[in-house]
Image (tube, rainbow, N blue to C red):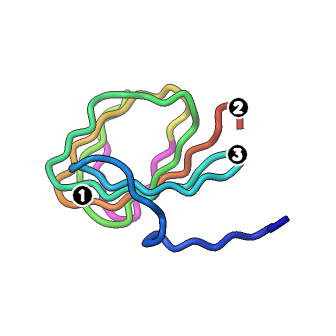
Amino acid sequence: MTKTSVYNWNDVTPYGDEKADRRVIAGKAGDLKRVFVKAGTVAAQHSHDFEQFFMVLEGTGVLTIAEGEVVLAPGVVVHFAPNAWHSALFHSDTVLVEVNFAKGG
């Protein structure tokens, strides 16, 4: 059984719509996702039933959370506990990397 896997984001099949290119690498306890979001995209308020981290690699925007607003810029890392609501407005083309944990993982 292989213990190590190596990937290139360019080889991972994208999914999404005209506003976002998403690519996911699934693991057993969670997944790693790269998301390219087009400028002007609005992510409506939502939550997830799993824990999530994301890091901004490129781009800018504003994240709205229960505690207020967070300016999104390269280097910003956000952690969401399960069911933490959030919404976002992306001012420029933005690249995020997400780590999503399996429920209970």
- Quadrant position of residue 82: top right
Q: How many marks?
A: 3
The residue positioned 39% from the left and 57% from the top of the image is: 14
Q: How far apart are marks 3 and 2 (CA)?
A: 9 Å
Q: How far apart are marks 1 and 2 (CA)?
A: 31 Å
The residue at which mark 1 appears reads as 60
The residue positioned 22% from the left and 61% from the top of the image is: 93
Range of the magenta residues?
70-79
Within 10 angstroms of label 1, few (less than 14), some, or many (20 or more) residues?
many
Badge 3 vs badge 2, beta-carbon distance below 8 Å: no
Answer with left or right where residue 66 lies relative to residue 28. left
In the displayed structure, 48 sits above or below 97; it is: above
What amino acid is found at the position of numbered circle 2 in the picture? Gly
Answer with left or right where residue 4 lies relative to residue 55. right
The residue positioned 44% from the left and 60% from the top of the image is: 13
Q: Which of marks 1 and 3 is nearer the N terminus?
A: 3
What amino acid is found at the position of numbered circle 1 in the picture? Thr
In the displayed structure, 94 sits above or below 84; it is: below
Badge 1 vs badge 2, beta-carbon distance below 8 Å: no
Q: Earlier in the sequence, mark 1 or mark 2?
A: 1
The residue positioned 32% from the left and 55% from the top of the image is: 21
Q: Report x, y in % for residue 59.
A: 26, 62
Q: Is mark 3 on a helix, strand or loop?
A: loop
Q: Which of marks 3 and 2 is nearer the N terminus?
A: 3
The residue at which mark 3 appears reads as 29
Q: Is mark 2 on a helix, strand or loop?
A: loop
Q: Report x, y in % for residue 19.
A: 22, 49
Q: In which quarter of the image is the N terminus?
A: bottom right
The residue at which mark 2 appears reads as 104
Front tag of 1 and 2: 2
30 magenta-colored: no
Q: Report x, y in % for residue 25.
A: 56, 57
